[in-house]
Amino acid sequence: MNSVADAARRVLTAADPNEKVKAARQAARAWRQGKLAHSFDAAMPDVPARPALPELLPPNRMPKRGKGGSERGRLALLHALAHIEFVAMHLAFDMAARFGAGFPRDFVDDWFSVGADEAMHFAILDRRLRALGSFYGALPAHAGLWEAASATAHDPLARLAVVPMALEARGLDVTPVTVERFRMSGDETSARVLERIYNDEIRHVRFGTKWFDAGCKDKGLIPAAHWQSLIGTHFRGVVKGPFNDSARDSAGLTREYYAAIA
């Protein structure tokens, strides 16, 4: 593990979840300690390695999981969130290694730190599933989450627009309600886990907005207008409310970005 690209590739090519989390933590620590060259000398895989389970299904074949009121519904929701965080590890390290050469050095600072956060989020969600008698892989998972990376592999601004500024931003909208549902069901432990993740995700969206704005400035583009154009081209789905405007504002994602196309 000698370079940014090499360290990121190790995360993406580790199939076992525990090994992937370990590789993510090692990569982030090695970068902080100055042990990795700011070099992009290894190609990222088109598709990251993953375990045999969970079974991946297209969105239209995913079973309905409810809103988290029942114990079964809460397990299904925690499993879905664990899968999102598992894929988010890939997205963060791929972002740093695939596009880092075109940005200042602190681009890697930010996205390696995000990758370490996502690894931690996955680990605590998997631990919570096991405490409740389940595990990551016990249920099927959404097959489409990596599609956003594949569709934007050619353009860092498109990747920033779709992943942190649309997909993760949607998490800011829905997580507070989910936390309250867990709390009302008496599952305070899971509620606290989700609150921790939510607070980290505000920072992740902020990094996305920060680097998107910087990239637009370099190219002479108007950030909000260019974001709307990229979302129209690359985002599968619609930008819809209700929006957590205060959390989005904290992340620099103001209404001028999304109100016109919501």
Image: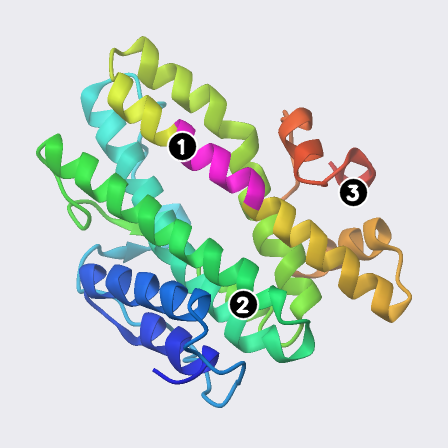
Q: What's the magenta region?
A: 195-203
Image location of residue 145, percent across then percent down: 44, 56
Q: Residues within 10 Å of mark 1 (few under 14, many from 20)?
A: few
Judged by depth in the image, the label closer to the viewer, 3 or 1, is 1
**Rendered position, 151 above or below 160:** below
Which sits earlier in the primary sequence, circle 3 or circle 1?
A: 1
Which numbered marker is on residue 95?
Answer: 2
Which quadrant does the C terminus fall into? top right
Find residue 196 and name its label: 1
Query: Which element is circle 3 on?
Result: helix
Binning the other alpha carbons within 10 Å of mark 3 as few (below 14), some (14 to 19) or many (20 upward) gives: some
Q: CA distance from mark 2 to mark 3?
A: 22 Å
Q: Which mark is residue 257?
A: 3
Residue at image location 55% in from the left, 47% down from the top:
204
In front of the other: 166 or 126:
126
- The x and y percentages for residue 242 are 63, 24
Q: Nearer the viewer, mark 2 or mark 3?
A: 2
